[in-house]
Amino acid sequence: MTVAVDFKNVDIVFGADQAGSLAMIDKGATRAEILEKTGNVLGCAGASLTVHEGEISVLMGLSGSGKSTLLRAVNRLNVVSRGQVLVKDGDKIVDVVTCDEPTLRRLRQKQVAMVFQQFGLLPWRTVEENVGLGLELAGVPDAERKERVHRQLKLVNLDQWSKKYAHELSGGMQQRVGLARAFATEAPILLMDEPFSALDPLIRTKLQDELLQLQAELKKTIIFVSHDLEEALKIGSHITIMEGGRIVQTGAPEDIVLRPANDYVRDFIANVNPLSVLTAWNVMRDSRDLDHGDNGWVWLDRRKTTRFKIDDHGLVAAAERDGKPAVWVSCADVEAQSEEAAQVFWANPGTSLKTVMLAMHRSQTAPVALFDDQSRFVGAIGIRDVLSAVLRR
Amino acid sequence: MDPISQFMVDHKIPIGAWGKAFFGFLTDNFDTIFRAFSNGLNFILDGLVNVLLLVPPVLLALVIAVIAWLLQRSRPLAIGVFLGLIFIINQNLWKQTVQTLVLVVAAAAMAMAIGVPLGIWAAHKPKVYRIMLPVLDLMQTLPTFVYLIPVLTLFGLGNAPGLIVTIIFVIPTAVRLTHLGVVSVPKSIIEAGEAFGATKSQLLWKVELPSALPTIMAGLTQSIMLSLSMVVFAALIGAGGLGTEINRALGSRRIDLGLEAGLAIVVLAIVLDRMTRIGVGGKK
């Protein structure tokens, strides 16, 4: 995977006494201490984060945690006091912190686009003129600009509204214009600064879905700032949690939910429904940790009700439940199965925990097996594994 | 007088003398330049007035009404403008009104031409604005009569000194409103411009000025109104027009003449105000 954006030990301080504040950061001073001593505001300190191409990396935290500050370092809306912000620029890597003005402008026009919380639309321009802003600034010829703008407006279903002024549109539509404006530059990197926070919940959910759909098609690298954990878990392929200007934890959504790094993160996830994040992979016991019997038989559960016979290729050769031969079927079609036959359900690593639980429910709490892409047996999920994941014990 | 006050009075700072010496120096050394400038300006202004007076009054009134329609696309406004101007012709004040109109439009245009760039500069550089502010206060509050005198000695009598006095009085408004307009551009849209790679001049022309336009246009309207209010003072140093009529009415206590000329100024003010309300509550 190629790296698209790489933050390396980024410190951002707002105020005059940069050197004094940086020295305090090195001693591990908190934001309040730095404010009291130097009068400067600590934006973020020692932030290191790698964002790969095509992923949605979410920066999370309460307001004032430094998430927006860090995001805005990528296109130098905030000036970095110390450290590097490396951004992929075609075949090259550019350090945004030190690059010259023309390079920065080119990055902003062609490589990094941005979507704002308050939309940032120009009220005296029509929708299409707003969407064309980036192209106009980059000097794209009129005809090409019109064509690209029209394509983007179609993409976000606003082509009927192109001649309207921005303020004539609802909030959700205005943010679609903001999205279209960012997409229109065809920049591979997209910065989204709490883009949906100003919208009401129904519209927010809708736009999140639309973003995910568009992302599946466009495969941008997205850095997304949010204070809403549900949103982060829904759209993020990686989540970074920040507190007081420092990064507390970085990981996949389920890592954050299953293994919170400290009490701050634990508080954060306290109200999250684990079923919305966890997959079969997160809760399974690895096949090496299971009870192995003779002749390649493996017990799937601690109560020893169900076992598989595994052949040399890792494939299942036979199954037995309560001492009787059984069939193994995918829990993707759990609804289609009759309940009479003795059966063992299997899941893929990406199968949601909810589906696994449904399969257990259907099979009188029998364990669920886990197969990889090549149908090889990799592990099993018993009822206790599910309970401990849901209860986070 | 108590000794302390007496002491202070005895050591009076000779501000008046310095000022006199300064203007004396200017008139002694650069008199020809100032006079040439004044003559040139007078020539242009008088020429403009004479050209406009060549046009039959009713036709000119019609042309102005058409311009009003082109600017605002409002039929009632165009008709109102036409009727107002007809009233002035009816009062036999057309020549004076044209003189005043030329002076006011020239003063407002010059004030905007100087004031808008200064206002933009001040908005981008807070330090500049801090230095500019007392100068603007001085220009607006120093009683007009006080700077009529040096302007008179430098430029002589006529339309040109009247124009210069009016410009001095009006520039602060143009600067202040432009400054206000540019500093109140929402930060979010400036950042949007920056984030999409605008250069400094693109940011100015495509984001800041369009956003500040309503305020700047309010500045234009205000400049015109203030120029009109200066007309009477400008007449004291020989600028022709309605102000001259009012001063004559004052000197000879002619209520009728004063009322007629005063109403003509009001009509002219309303006409110009309504015509120049561009971007204020207009296109949104």
Image (cartoon, grey):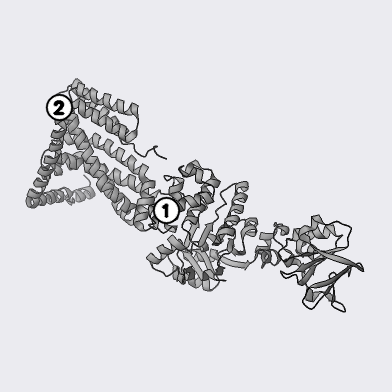
SS at circle 1: helix
Q: As drawn, is B9 to the left or to the right of B201?
A: left
Viewport quadrant of the N terminus of chain A: bottom right
Residue visible at 72% across and 71% down in the picture: A374
Residue visible at 71% across and 62% down in the picture: A278
SS at circle 2: helix
Q: Badge 1 is on which residue? A: A145
Question: Which amino acid lies under the numbered mark 1 shown in the image of this protein?
Answer: Arg
Asked whether B177 or B220 is in front, the reply is: B220
Q: Chain of mark 2?
A: B
Asked whether A98 or A334 is in front, the reply is: A334
Residue A143: % across, % down? 40, 52
**Relative height, residue A344 to residue B185 (above, below):** below
Residue B259: % across, % down? 22, 23
Q: Quadrant of residue B44?
A: top left
Q: Chain of mark 1?
A: A
**Relative height, residue A225 to residue B213 (above, below):** below
Asked whether A320 or A66 is in front, the reply is: A320
Residue B75: % across, % down? 34, 28
Q: As drawn, is A265 to the left or to the right of A86?
A: right
Q: Is residue B143 visible?
A: no
Residue visible at 68% across and 60% down in the picture: A269
Q: What crowding class fits label 1: few (fewer than 14 Cα within 10 Å), some (14-19), or many (20 or more)?
A: many
Q: Is residue A8 visible?
A: yes
